[in-house]
């Protein structure tokens, strides 16, 4: 089973539009903004006139994943779909509640707290979702399993490195890239059935059991 061609096209279009929005957002930032040191969330920070573009990127990403989650043919188990749904909702929430600005302008501390909670949800739900898909799909092709493991390792390591690195902006964008790639691959790849078809022999007939 796989997503319909129309839904695949829509999901890939939303992902591509999100990538474009996130990539172009720094062009709308003040000169002091740096893609090397500043995070993606800081390009969507409170009080910035150009922050709408990065926020749009978050929203598009969230809706793209919701489209995948809402279609049973994706082949994910129930808990994996719930986890990825949590990722999508958290991504949209991260756009709704903005990060504090990196300069000295005033900002809403409570909104910044809500953004931090949403961002934490993005990371936790993505990690849980990828792990659940990996566990549930024992017959995943080797290259897809490698991508699963790379995404899981990045989700675990990059947040720790970002907090202590002068290139935190680059590291976070790498994490975004891996997330985009993972969802894009899940959208376009053929579905592989994980259930085996047991064969039951009797003295009279051979019966092939159906999918459970």
Image (cartoon, rainbow, N blue to C red):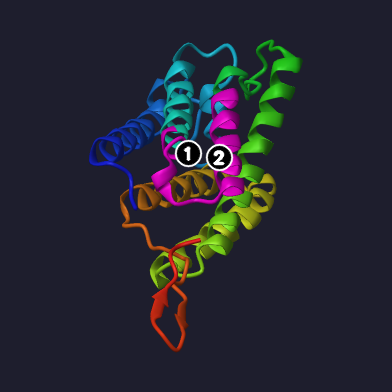
Sequence-wise, which precedes: disc 1 or disc 2? 2
Which residue occupies the foreground of this view, 26 or 180? 180
Q: Measuring from the top left, give residue 175's x and y in whole percent.
A: 51, 48
Q: Does 15 sit above or below residue 26?
A: below
Measure how far apart labels 1 and 2 are at the Cα level: 33 Å
Determine the residue located farthest toward the front in the rendered image. 204
Residue displayed at 40% across by 20% down: 28
The residue tagged with tag 1: helix, strand or loop? helix
Identify the magenta region. Answer: 67-94
The residue indicated by pointer 1 is 69
Q: Measuring from the top left, give residue 182's x and y in whole percent.
A: 43, 52
Contact between marks 1 and 2 (CB within 8 A): the answer is no
Which residue occupies the foreground of this view, 52 or 74? 74
The residue tagged with tag 2: helix, strand or loop? loop
Q: Does 80 sit above or below residue 212?
A: above
Quarter residue 16 falls in: top left
The residue indicated by pointer 2 is 37
Asked if residue 124 can be seen in this view, the reply is: yes
Quarter residue 208 falls in: bottom left
Magenta stretch contains residue 78: yes
Q: Residues within 10 Å of mark 2 (few under 14, many from 20)?
A: some
Q: Residues within 10 Å of mark 1 (few under 14, many from 20)?
A: many
Give the number of the disc on residue 24. Answer: none
Q: Nearer the viewer, mark 1 or mark 2?
A: 1
Main secondary structure along the magenta-highlighted residues: helix
């Amino acid at each position: 089973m796989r997503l319909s061609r129309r839904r695949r096209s829509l999901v890939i279009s939303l992902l591509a539009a999100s990538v474009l929005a996130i990539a172009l957002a720094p062009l709308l930032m003040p000169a002091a903004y740096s893609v090397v040191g500043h995070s993606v969330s800081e390009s969507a920070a409170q009080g910035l006139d150009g922050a709408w573009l990065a926020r749009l990127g978050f929203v598009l990403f969230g809706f793209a994943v919701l489209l995948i989650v809402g279609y049973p043919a994706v082949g994910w188990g129930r808990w994996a779909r719930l986890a990825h749904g949590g990722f999508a909702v958290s991504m949209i929430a991260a756009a709704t509640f903005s990060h504090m600005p990196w300069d000295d302008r005033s900002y809403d501390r409570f909104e910044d707290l809500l953004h931090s909670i949403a961002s934490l949800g993005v990371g936790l739900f993505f990690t849980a979702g990828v792990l659940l898909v990996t566990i549930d799909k024992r017959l995943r092709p080797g290259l897809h399993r490698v991508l699963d493991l790379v995404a899981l390792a990045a989700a675990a390591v990059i947040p720790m490195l970002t907090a202590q690195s002068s290139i935190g902006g680059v590291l976070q964008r790498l994490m975004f890239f891996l997330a985009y790639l993972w969802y894009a691959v899940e959208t376009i790849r053929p579905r592989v059935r994980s259930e085996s078809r047991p064969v039951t022999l009797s003295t009279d007939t051979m019966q092939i059991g159906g999918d459970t």
